[in-house]
Image (spheres, rainbow, N blue to C red):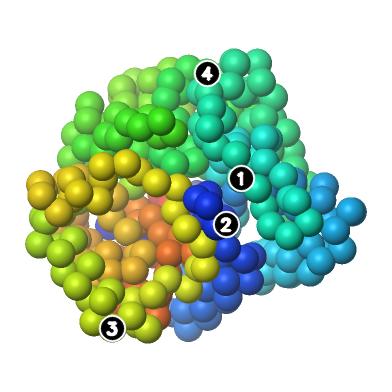
Amino acid sequence: MQVILTFDYELFFGTYTGSVQKCMIEPTDRLLAIARKFDIPLVFFVDIGFLIKLQEYKQHFPELEEDYNSIRNQFAEIAASNSEVQLHIHPHWEKSHYDGEKWVVVTDGCYKLSDFPDEEAEAIVRKYYQYLTNFTGKKPTTYRGGGWCIQPFSQIEKVLQELGIEKDSTVFPGGKFESEHYQFDFTAVSRFENPYRFQSDVTKAEPNGYFLEIPIASWEFSPLFYWRLYVLGRLNPSAHKMIGDGSFLAQPGRKKSVLLHKTWNHVSSDGYYASQLTKQANYYSDKKVKTFVVIGHPKGMTHYSLKQLEKFISRTKSLYEFVNFDSCSL
Ligand SMILES: [Zn+2]
């Protein structure tokens, strides 16, 4: 089985975005140290809309220059450690700005690409792709929709194909959520799904499709898991506090629902979720699944999760092959 450890490299999109240092630079430094220690590659899905805004606003607000340069230097380290940078789009940056003190994030009516007219959505994809390519000097090959919002895929099918983005890793089988901001439904994709080709609908396999979906692994979490998560956070806040210093965009009703019912969620290396990785990977391997894609966020790392991630890699490195999207064989 091939294991792909992915991290969405971004600020928070709630009331407080948090700082570049705490949400991106510091936890990513720790992740890169782990990658070097075990000689494995990581994948960073970079929220490129933010970088574009950062470059734009640093002309007027010199304090942003340092953030921009830190990110630039970190990208050089990512490249040097054999890890890769891929395309991640949060289009709400189109409507957001810096007010001289903080980022004012506007997400209403613009959180996902499908909130934009088709032509505008295509132009955003093209612009973000171009910027990322110029920034890293390397063409991305893999896409992940911001907040798992990638439907209807037909809206961006043509432009992604034209740009040669052949792979996607947004889907987590069984996942479904709908709110004012979010909208995704992956219930049509079966559990323990192997990578599959598709064309216009990201949940429908088409053997001759241009695109290859490499789904994020998913897992059915019991309410007990979430009760433990909340209790541990209270008992040992320093180990379980996120390194990122911002606040999440709300997912109304979700917190209550996970404490009451079994819920499908992605396999994650964030916070307490990281404690489940070895068990989850072994389960996937028993089911003969070819790839085990884990999603995490530098901003969502805790001291505990970094330790758990290290444990997971050291326990399973001889069993599984740790790869990235450009080096995986499918
Ligand atoms: Zn994201």
Q: Nearer the viewer, residue 99 or 291?
A: 99
7 up-or-down from 274: above or below: above
Location of mark 3 (residue): 236
**Cα gap from disc 3 to disc 1, whole angstroms:** 31 Å
Would you say the residues marked 2 and 1 are in contact, meaning their CB atoms lie under 8 Å apart?
yes
**Cα gap from disc 2 to disc 3, whole angstroms:** 24 Å
- Which residue is drawn at the image coordinates 79% and 69% (left, top)? 66
Amino acid marked by disc 1: Val
Which dot marks residue 78? none
Residue 71 place in picture, x, y as percent: 70, 64
Is residue 92 in sight in this rendering? yes
Quadrant housing the C terminus: top left
Residue 146 place in picture, x, y as percent: 49, 41
Location of mark 4 (residue): 155
Which dot marks residue 17? 2
**Cα gap from disc 4 to disc 1, whole angstroms:** 24 Å
Q: Mark 3: is the Cβ under 8 angstroms from ligand 1?
A: no
The kind of secondary structure element at disc 4 is helix
Would you say the residues marked 2 and 3 are in contact, meaning their CB atoms lie under 8 Å apart?
no
Q: Earlier in the sequence, mark 4 or mark 1?
A: 1
Residue 205 place in picture, x, y as percent: 31, 24
Location of mark 1 (residue): 105
207 left or right of 98? Answer: left
The kind of secondary structure element at disc 1 is loop
96 up-or-down from 222: above or below: above
**Cα gap from disc 4 to disc 2, whole angstroms:** 28 Å
Q: Earlier in the sequence, mark 4 or mark 2?
A: 2
